[in-house]
Image (cartoon, rainbow, N blue to C red):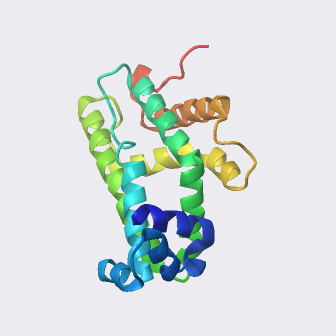
Amino acid sequence: MLEIARAAFLREGYAAASMSEIAIKVGGSKATLYSYFPSKKDLFVAVIREEVQRMFAPLFEMDESQGSMRAVLERFAQRFLKLLLADDAIAFYRLIVAESARFPEVGQAAFQLGVQHGTDKLAGCFAAAMERGDLRRADASVAVRQFLDLCGGELHRKRLFGVVDADDRDAVDKQARNAVAMFLAAYGVGERSRSPRA
């Protein structure tokens, strides 16, 4: 049911997607669909919730046991960018932004379920790294938000405007390295904050 609704919302947008057509494709009646979801907005939020959890749940896992802080952050930045630039992620981003003006609760739900939940989880990893002395002590939540902004940056904007493709590996690697270098310049400790020699 959610997969069919997902396809309809992505194809037609929230306003144009029809509960009747979704019900027909599901193979049931409109009344049955409304028994699960009292409104189209409820169905849309359920689709967003499932999509956000599917995309973001595995993303905000950070394996800190594998190498230096720089290496850990670079691996994370590469994974984050690949997800952020993927066709589905771009399509959902555009859809949520487009509908949030008329339905702020849709944008708020997506933000809470995806962005806020993920940054809270990652803040725990950053706080632990600060305790170990791998990162400079600071507000871990602020550090996470700044790191994620550095990761997405120009490349995400270009992808939204269709300037770059999702599978530009060189651009992803370069953006990840630059984001980590900038982040460690602010939050790194001693040798860890220095850029690796070429």
Total numbered circles:
0
Q: Residue at x 36, y 62 (%)?
A: 113
Q: Quadrant of residue 82?
A: top right
Q: Quadrant of the N terminus?
A: bottom left
45 relative to 15, above or below: above
Q: Position of residue 62 (x, y in %)?
A: 34, 35
Q: Residue at x 60, y 64 (%)?
A: 94
Res. 90 in view: yes
Q: Position of residue 158 (x, y in %)?
A: 70, 49
Q: Residue at x 44, y 51 (%)?
A: 145
57 relative to 16, above or below: above
87 relative to 41, above or below: above
Residue at the right extreme of this rendering: 163
Depth check: give the residue in front, 137 or 150. Answer: 150
Residue 36 shown left or right of residue 102 in the figure: left
Q: Position of residue 144 (x, y in %)?
A: 40, 47
Q: Position of residue 84 (x, y in %)?
A: 54, 47
70 relative to 86, above or below: above
Depth check: give the residue in front, 16 or 124. Answer: 16
Q: Quadrant of residue 167?
A: top right
Q: Quadrant of the C terminus?
A: top right
Q: Residue at x 55, y 76 (%)?
A: 14
Residue 90 shown left or right of residue 110 in the figure: right
Residue 89 shown left or right of residue 158 in the figure: left
Res. 111 in view: no
